[in-house]
Every structure is written in C-alpha cells, then in structure tokens.
C-alpha cells in the first residue's frame, strides 16, 4: 500500500481494522509525525494499546525518529502526544551522528536501563535537536528531559579550541599492560565533560593493587610515559562509545600506543594535579579535574 496516495480517513479506517501497513506501522507513525497528523498518531497509539499483538508499534523506533521528525517540523502538539506515549524513552539503537564532517559513531547500548546510560542518551538526543530544530522546540524538550530526570542537566557540547569543532562528551582509552603474567592488565582512562569546558578523568587498573584503589605501578608507568610494558592502547570499542575517527586498525600498534598515550597525557596536563587524591577515593581510583 502506498499511504502517500490515500486519504487520512482511509488510513484511519485501516488502522481501525487493525491492518498492519507495508513497511511496518512505524513508517506510518514517522510519516504522520513529519506532517503533524495528530489524529492518525492517536489512532496508531490507541490501536497498539488495545491489541498490541495484532497492531504492533514501537513508538521510539530508530532512535526516537517519530519524536525527532515532529521536533524538526515544529509540531508542538505532536511532540506532546508522542511524549505521553513514551516516544522519548531510550530505544537502544546505535546512534550515528555527523558533526561538522567528523563522523562519530556513538553507542549508548552498554548498560541499557542504567541512570548513566539514560543520561547519555538524553544528551545525544538533545544534541541532535539543538542542531536540527527551532530554538523554541529545543528549549521545550530540554526542559522536558530535565524535569523528567532531576539529576540531568543539559550543557552544550564541548568544542576543540583549536579546530572549533565539537568533540565527544565522553572518551575511554584502555591500555593493555603486560607484567610477565599470563593475562595482561588493563588500565582504563575515562574522560567525561562536566560542562562545556571542564572535564574529569578517572583512572583505574584491574590488577590486585589497582582493585584496592591504590595507584599501582601500571598506572604510574603510563602517566610517566614509560611505554616498555604497554602492549596495546586504544580507544575502547565496546563499552560506552565508539569513535571511528580514532580506531584505525591499519596503523602501526606502537604508533597507536604513543598516540593514545599522548592523548591521555594531554588530558592530565590540563588538570589540577594538586587535587590528586592519595589512595582510596570512593571506588574511583583517581579523579582529576581540569581548570579551564
Ligand atoms: Zn595495576
């Protein structure tokens, strides 16, 4: 069926008969969201609520596409209807965003349902809305997400001062450190921005000493640029974020280690070293905060 060529009334008739549409009911939802056809959207939602098996509908499919369409086309009433039907919930789809020709492939699928996961998901969605929608629509949705999650506060993406381009809100770089033992240890550096300019760096190591939140020699080696025992160093691909810009498998591993080491050292260079805690720090080994 080509629903672009039939009337709204005919579509509603078919929804009432619980007939699924070619391309899925979601495709109809997307199309109705673009055009602000609120009566169709209400019928779709209602049909799904009454008989979900007969009329399936994933309201937040494809990274909240229905909501994003409605937002992009400025349909305030449609946005409200969609939000009431949970179209703003995380959809656990991978998210690919192009930011000024830098392709960043975010995956927020690490721990679906966790508070942090939801928070990151909200940031990505609002970033998209910031770039693509009217300021008034952005303000409306920003207020919505902040009200819905009271720990969440949106701030604009950080910008690289040299290039002027947006940079990721979160980075994880992991180093594998060989210690003449069967299994290498992993030292993890994670950087997360706490506002547009300032960030925190967490460092942890999974060796026995590192697990006790004591600065082990593996961490000391890396932050002192001693690379002899480092056998791999790369941006983590699975855990929280993918950055295709950095994960270039064709490069020489040693070069990659140095490159990632330099990245980590540059993070630490702009932090308050004097705030470096000794020993245990509430489950997080070391936390540095930069002073921009
Ligand atoms: Zn260690």
Image: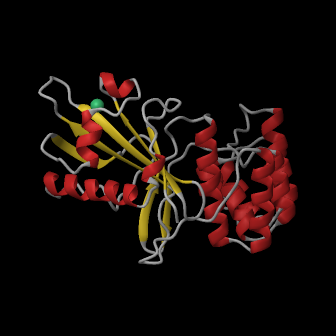
Compare residues 82 and 29 and report the one nearer the observer: 82
Compare residues 121 and 7 and report the one nearer the observer: 121
Dividing the image into 4 quarters, which one contains the N terminus? bottom right
Q: Is residue 6 left or right of residue 68?
A: right
Colour scheme in use: secondary structure
Q: Is residue 290 left or right of residue 68?
A: left
Q: At 48% across and 34% down in the image, what residue appears? A: 284
Q: At 74% across and 71% down in the image, what residue appears? A: 73
Q: At 37% across and 59% down in the image, what residue appears? A: 269
Compare residues 184 and 53 and report the one nearer the observer: 184
Residue 243 pos. (x, y %): 39, 56
State the residue lying farthest toward the bottom. Answer: 163
Q: Does residue 23 show up?
A: no
Up/down of 113 relative to 136, above or below: above
- Quadrant of residue 123 in the image? bottom right
State the residue lying farthest toward the front. Answer: 274
Residue 259 pos. (x, y %): 24, 59
Residue 30 pos. (x, y %): 69, 58
- Quadrant of residue 250 in the image? bottom left
Residue 137 pos. (x, y %): 78, 67
Up/down of 159 relative to 255, above or below: below
Compare residues 189 and 165 and report the one nearer the observer: 189
Q: Does residue 177 show up?
A: yes
Regarding ligand 1, which quadrant of the image does it lie in?
Answer: top left
Q: At 79% across and 45% down in the image, what residue appears? A: 148
């Amino acid at each position: 069926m080509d629903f672009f060529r039939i009337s709204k009334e005919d579509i509603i008739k078919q929804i009432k008969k619980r007939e699924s549409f070619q391309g899925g009911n979601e495709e109809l939802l997307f199309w109705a969201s673009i055009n602000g056809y609120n009566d169709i959207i209400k019928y779709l939602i209602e049909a799904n609520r009454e008989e979900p098996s007969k009329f399936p509908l994933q309201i937040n499919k494809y990274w909240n596409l229905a909501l994003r369409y409605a937002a992009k086309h400025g349909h305030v009433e449609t946005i409200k209807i969609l939000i009431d039907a949970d179209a703003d919930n995380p959809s656990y789809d991978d998210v690919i965003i192009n930011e000024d020709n830098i392709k960043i492939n975010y995956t927020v699928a690490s721990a679906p349902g966790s508070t942090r996961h939801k928070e990151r998901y909200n940031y990505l969605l609002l970033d998209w809305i910031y770039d693509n929608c009217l300021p008034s629509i952005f303000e409306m949705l920003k207020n919505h997400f902040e009200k819905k999650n009271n720990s969440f506060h949106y701030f604009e993406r950080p910008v690289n001062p040299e290039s002027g381009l947006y940079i990721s809100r979160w980075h994880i770089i992991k180093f594998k450190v060989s210690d003449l033992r069967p299994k290498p240890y992993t030292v993890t550096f994670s950087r997360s921005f706490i506002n547009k300019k300032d960030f925190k760096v967490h460092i942890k190591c999974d060796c026995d000493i590192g697990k006790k939140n004591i600065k082990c020699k593996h961490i000391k080696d890396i932050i002192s640029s001693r690379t002899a025992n480092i056998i791999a160093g790369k941006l983590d691909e699975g855990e929280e974020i993918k950055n295709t810009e950095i994960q270039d498998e064709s490069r020489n591993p040693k070069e990659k280690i140095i490159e990632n080491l330099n990245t980590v050292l540059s993070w630490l260079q702009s932090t308050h070293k004097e705030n470096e805690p000794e020993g245990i720090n509430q489950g997080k080994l070391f936390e540095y905060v930069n002073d921009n």
